[in-house]
Image (cartoon, rainbow, N blue to C red):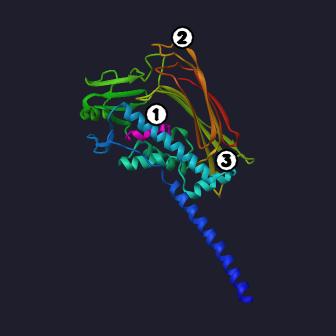
Amino acid sequence: MKFLKLAVVITVVSTLIFSCTKDEIQNNIIDQNLKKSLDIKLDSEVKKVRNQCDGEGILSFKNEDAYLSTMKQLKELTLEHTKAIQNQIGEVSTDAFVRIYEEKGFNNKQVLFDFSEKMGINSLFTDLYNKEAAWLENGGTNINEDPDNHFVSDVYERALFNTNSEVIVGNKIYKKLENGHLIISDLNFDLLCSLRTNMDLLRLPKGVEFVGDLTDGSGKRMAACASSRADWGYERSRNANGEENFRIKWKVEINAPIFGTRNVKAITTNYWCKKNRNNGNCKSWKKQAATTTSKVSGFWNGGADDCAVLINFTDAENSGFSQKIEARRDIDGGSTSSGQVTGEFNGVNGISKTHVLTW
């Protein structure tokens, strides 16, 4: 009888151990899969070629459709991967979400890393991401030094560029600049190499076209309208001791991608402060998922040649539980003038900010 009771106990305990082990193994499988992105479908329309200026890789797309479809796929897969991570973590408090996300090593931009690895290229995205992470880890206080403030703000566009903001589409080389982009005909790398070190947008050589907002020698815009412009800053909160504990980075911009539709954006990014044990100051900053809202509103020129008459564009607002939330409104062919676009931002710990884009 004692032997029978012992056998039952052993069986029950073994069953529980097996069940827990099975669950743990299954959870580990799910976790490991989520550390990798979903399958990226590539074909002969995109390849890596050698950039003759520096020997590094540069992506080459068959045509504009291939470029835009690749960007669309990266965005869709990133959103799908982010939702899968959120579903895996489940309904937990904000603090618990951040802890689990960090402990499991999740990254909601894993798709973009995997794409760069698959193409064998150090993309502008991977370069800026790693520089930003190092900057935040080492204090990350002066926003003007933040590598993420690059004039190519769209992470999916960054993923297609090399570290010099260049890409090949068809038989032309495109180089993104702060105020527009260059188009270099006939894959002329000699011109690209020359323009990297000696560029005068008012005196470009034959075979090079500039699309964007021209400035004079002092950097002053030669027209009231602008199609590429951005402002950014931090808004912070403090604890009862006056110490910084959270912050948001707000950014409002009008953006002109090399392909696709011009747009206006408001972007909110959340951070939490990792304290220094000795003095309570911020040792480093970490991005944090939180309930976040971004909104952009204002006026544009309706695609006209100047900004003499401006019309209201429909507000764009986006909300969610995320490290970063972007509100975007497409304004096909549009530009605007100073003081005509407003961004509204609400993020972690109830921090809020409103800012008007001026120049």
- Which residue lies most toward the top here? 308
Q: Which residue is label 2 attached to?
A: 309
- Upstream in sequence: badge 1 or badge 3: 1
The quarter of the displayed image where residue 105 is located: bottom right
Q: Nearer the viewer, residue 20 or 138?
A: 20
Calculate the distance from the C-alpha at mark 1 to the C-alpha at mark 3. 28 Å
Q: How many marks?
A: 3
| Residue at horizontal 33 percent and vertical 25 percent from the top | 200
* 157 part of magenta stretch: yes
- Upstream in sequence: badge 1 or badge 2: 1
The quarter of the displayed image where residue 42 is located: top left
Q: Which residue is label 3 attached to?
A: 245
Q: What crowding class fits label 2: few (fewer than 14 Cα within 10 Å), some (14-19), or many (20 or more)?
A: few
Q: What crowding class fits label 1: few (fewer than 14 Cα within 10 Å), some (14-19), or many (20 or more)?
A: some
Three-letter amino acid code at the position of disc 2: Val
Q: Which residues are magenta?
A: 148-163
* 161 part of magenta stretch: yes
| Residue at horizontal 49 percent and vertical 43 percent from the top | 77
Residue 183: x percent and y percent? 33, 27
Indicate left or right for 40 with 102 as reference.
Answer: left
User: Is 276 drawn above or below residue 341 in the view shown?
Assistant: below
Calculate the distance from the C-alpha at mark 1 to the C-alpha at mark 2. 27 Å
Q: Which residue is label 1 attached to?
A: 151
| Residue at horizontal 48 percent and vertical 16 percent from the top | 303
